[in-house]
Amino acid sequence: MGALEIVTLALTHPNEFRILLQFWNYHEPRRDITKKEEHATSGWDRPTMRRCWELLDHSSRSFAAVIKELDGDLARVICLFYIVLHDVKQPLLRSFHEKTITPGWSFNGNGPDEKDRIVLVDYPVIVEELLRLEPAYLPRDIVDICHKMETGMADFAHRAALSSEPLALNTIEEYDLYCHYVAGLVGEGLSRLFSATKKESPRIAQQLELSNSLGLLLQKTNIIRDFREDADERRFFWPREIWGSAEFSPDGRTPATDILQLLREPKRAAWVQSAMVVDALRHTCDALDYLRLLKNQSVFNFAAIPATMALATLDLCFMNTTMFERNIKIRKAKAAELIMRSTNPREVALIFKEYARSIHAKAHPADPNFLRISVACAKIEHWAERNYPSFIRLPSSSSSPSSPTGPSFDPADARSRIAIADAETDRRATEEKRLLEIRERIAGNANGNGNGNDTLSAGALKQQSQGPPWDFLAFVGAAVFLVMAISIGIALAILYFTA
């Protein structure tokens, strides 16, 4: 941001300016891949790997930032994985997994204005770094996912080549399949790499459905937000099953024959857009389930930050027809706030719940999707309450020393009384179990010693379980004090009469 932008933000949005100041002052990157001590895992000291990091920045600067903060060599592996999975011309698609590990291979057939041309022109440096990876990463994960992705994308590209119309998807099922090839497989590959690099447990690599759902949530969010940009490039990823439905026509009877009608009919556009948002929201609970499984902090941040930004973007787009006129993005201060907050599953669930409530608050009863929106948002709310109940308060890092060190209950919430009663019942059951164990142990000792005294009173057992016999100790203390007082009195009397 330039100086003028900063001053303008401070005057027009002071709260956002404060958040950005907090981000700049307190949020420090977890690692710097350019430092000498990081060269062994980041490869920054090698010109070829340094060029790969530059190509990653060229491909996606925002995504590159979270990749660079991953622990150890996982950052380098994910960097190569990300830049490998880029669009290639249709004739190369079905063999790209072979080209990607062929030394010296490059491709300059892209147009001079295409964004990713530089990646394919400089591909030999990527191949060299790929071949440096441990065998456990390269064939099993990166090349395998590349092969699956290229096959799926080639099928869609071939279908478009046979048609005189631009690429368009007809059904929601086709839409899901396309997003699976583009992003779901990336999620699968990342999960496998998390496990292969020992940053996460082996079971993460087996969570194919959950990792696919997280990928679909991110990809569908981008497709919703980028409608205008894609339309200008004659790319149409919104499925006809949604935008062509008569349910979303102004009169409720006329199906759309052209997706570009959305640019001319604001009411239809709003209803279709809400249907697209509902479709994306169905992946949120799976995404939250996946994030709960991640244990490595850098891996969690890597997955959670894009997920929370996706929910913020869906909230921004919902009922906002401006996205049909131009590309819109969440504000920088909001992005900074999400980066600082997306550090644990509970906070991420809270962020999801906040945006679900915001989306539901903007829903219009006249929208044919109104009930579906309500259900989708309620599922997020239910997931958050089931896993992280809001009436249980956790101590914050800023709490005073006198504050409770453990969880506490919100007294204003009726559920707290039930939880307190359950906790008391559990405490009593535990105490009774301890008394029973002590009784059985003493009875066993008595039988073993041959004296018939095999029982103790409940009061005596309870006294033993709770600690020393304070009543008896108090009596002994008082007796000792009395004896000492009498002795001192006698000594003083003798001294008085003999003086």
Image: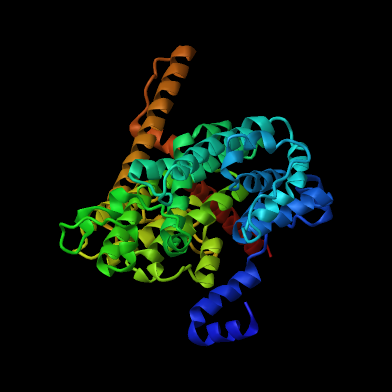
Q: Is residue 398 visible?
A: yes
The image quadrant where one finds the N terminus is: bottom right
Q: Position of residue 349 (x, y in %)?
A: 42, 53
Taking the image as shown, residue 470 lies to the left or right of residue 242, namely right
| 15 in relation to 346, above or below | below
Q: Position of residue 25 (x, y in %)?
A: 65, 72
Taking the image as shown, residue 315 lies to the left or right of residue 80, namely left
Rendered residue at 84%/51% (across/down): 45
The image quadrant where one finds the C terminus is: bottom right
Rendered residue at 72%/54% (across/down): 53
Nearest to the observer: residue 294 or residue 179:
179
Rendered residue at 63%/30% (across/down): 140
Rendered residue at 53%/56% (across/down): 305
Q: Position of residue 75 (x, y in %)?
A: 68, 48
| 86 in relation to 30, above or below | above
Residue positioned most to the front:
164
